[in-house]
Every structure is written in structure tokens, then in C-alpha cells.
Amino acid sequence: MPRWAWWIGGIGMVFLYIWAFYYFFVGPTGFRWRALYGDANYPDGYEIHGIDISHYQGKIDWDELRGAQIDGCPLRFVIIKSTEGSSRLDDKFEDNFYQAREHGFVRGAYHFWSNKSSARAQAYHFLNKVPLEDGDLPPVLDVEHKPNGRSTEDFQRDILTWLHIVEDKYHVKPIIYTYYKFKELYLSAPVFDDYPYWIAHYYVDEVKYKGEWKFWQHTDAGRLPGIKGYVDFNIYNGSYYDLKQLTIGSDRIDEDDES
């Protein structure tokens, strides 16, 4: 190939890398990057704050965490990593799950989707390991990757299989956690609009996703007493009463109150 062709190809690759870096880490619709954007900001207009945790947070001082505040508001909910794939259980799940309720938080549990296991195996693994109770948030499916070589339609059927199995157990719509771009690309079919959404979109003033959503994970750089290192901050799109109404068994509690 002539020298000029190599130069054009090299320049093109440089521009491609710059564009990809901006698109995924800097631009207003990407995850964003802590090194560029610094510490956590607090979105205006929201009062119901929470966190999500896993073994990455290590040992938590729950007595300290109970009195923590985010932007002057009390910490209301904690969503805990439970299972991954068809066999893994988070090392800290059982203790975190117990402590969250003992210390007065509205708690939830999420399953991290794996493309290496069947949807049915993953759903039953979650149900076998996660004892959700009345007052807990609906089960959460964390899905962030589509398998290569599988069509979007087949992938969506897999996700719906997990959702239907778990919904049949708890009689509530599971929450879907994903990030803004993934929702637009792979979960935009109307059937998914029936589910509550938890959208990850960091370092922006507002969620760019235009559909309905319940939770917004707005930073991965939060700091709180009782937790060493960073923790994800989330807000709930509604009042504390609305949050409680979302929990498992809230319909039965309302019926008992009326009677």
C-alpha cells in the first residue's frame, strides 16, 4: 500500500479511539468517568436517597451507616447484590441483607445477569438463595451485556424468561437495572415498559432516558460514614410513601388497613 494510505488509516484509527473514548466515558449519554468528573453531585428535586452494595464495600459499620445522610436527607433504602449467573452468591449478601433490615432500611436484592448461563437456571438460583419478604423491594435484574452472536429478539426472550419466573414467585414486577444506552439499544420493546426501571447514568444533572423510571444510579463515587471507599448513590423518583407502596406485600397491607 502507498505511504499516504497508511497515514490516512493511522489518522482514522486515532480519531476512532478518540470518538469511542468520548462516547463511552465523557459524553452526556455514557457512564462517565470518575477521573474526569470528580466527586458525587446530588441531583436537585429528590429527597429519597439510597445506595447499592456488594462485597466490594467490605465490612460495613451498620450503626454508623444508619445515621448517614445524603445531601441533608436520610438514607432510606439499600439494594444488595445477591446472586450472579447460575451458581455464584455474593460473599457479603447474607450479612448485608440481614443487617439492612435490622437497621431500618428498605432493602432490596439484585441478580447480576450472566451470558454464560440459561435464563431459567439463573432465575431459580436467585429464588433459591434470596428470601425476599413483605416490605422488601421487588427483585432486581441487573443486565448490562448482550451475548455476541445472539439476536436482540432471542436475548429479549431470555430476559423475559427470568422476569416471568421471578414474577410468578413474588407476584410483583421485577425491577430492571441497566444503563441508559443499553436500555435504548436492547430493551426498547414495548413489553419491557411494564417493568420498573433503575437507570444508571453518572455525572449528569438529569437522566437522559425519556421513559418512566423509578430509580436513578447517579454516581459511583459516593462517600458515607460506615463504608470505606466509594459506594453507588441512587435516588428514588417519588415520595417515601411511594417507595413503600412499591414493596412486596404493600397491596395486602393496604387491604388489612382498610378492613
Image: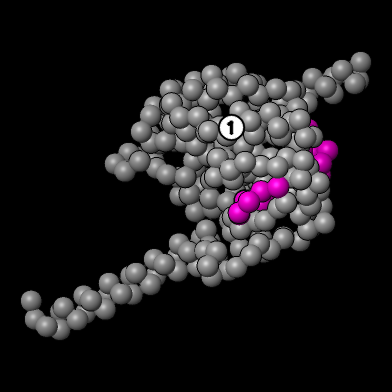
Q: Is residue 259 magenta?
A: no
Question: Left or right: 232 with respect to 115?
Answer: right
Location of residue 43 with respect to 78 vertically, above or below = below
Location of residue 44 with respect to 115 vertically, above or below = below
The quadrant the N terminus occupies is bottom left
Residue furthest to the left: 1
Question: Left or right: 42 with respect to 195?
Answer: right
In terms of secondary structure, where does tag 1 sit?
helix
Q: Which residues are magenta?
A: 226-245
Residue that badge 1 annotates: 93
Please name whichever residue, 189 or 84, is drawn nearer the observer in this view of the structure: 84
Q: Position of residue 191 (x, y in %)?
A: 54, 35
Which residue is found at the position 39% from the left and 42% from the top?
Answer: 146
Which residue is found at the position 66% from the left and 62% from the top?
Answer: 40
Q: Position of residue 189 (x, y in %)?
A: 50, 41
Amino acid identity at mark 1: Phe
Q: Position of residue 75 (x, y in %)?
A: 77, 46
Q: Quadrant of residue 167?
A: top right
Q: Position of residue 87 (x, y in %)?
A: 43, 26
Question: Left or right: 246 with respect to 83?
Answer: right
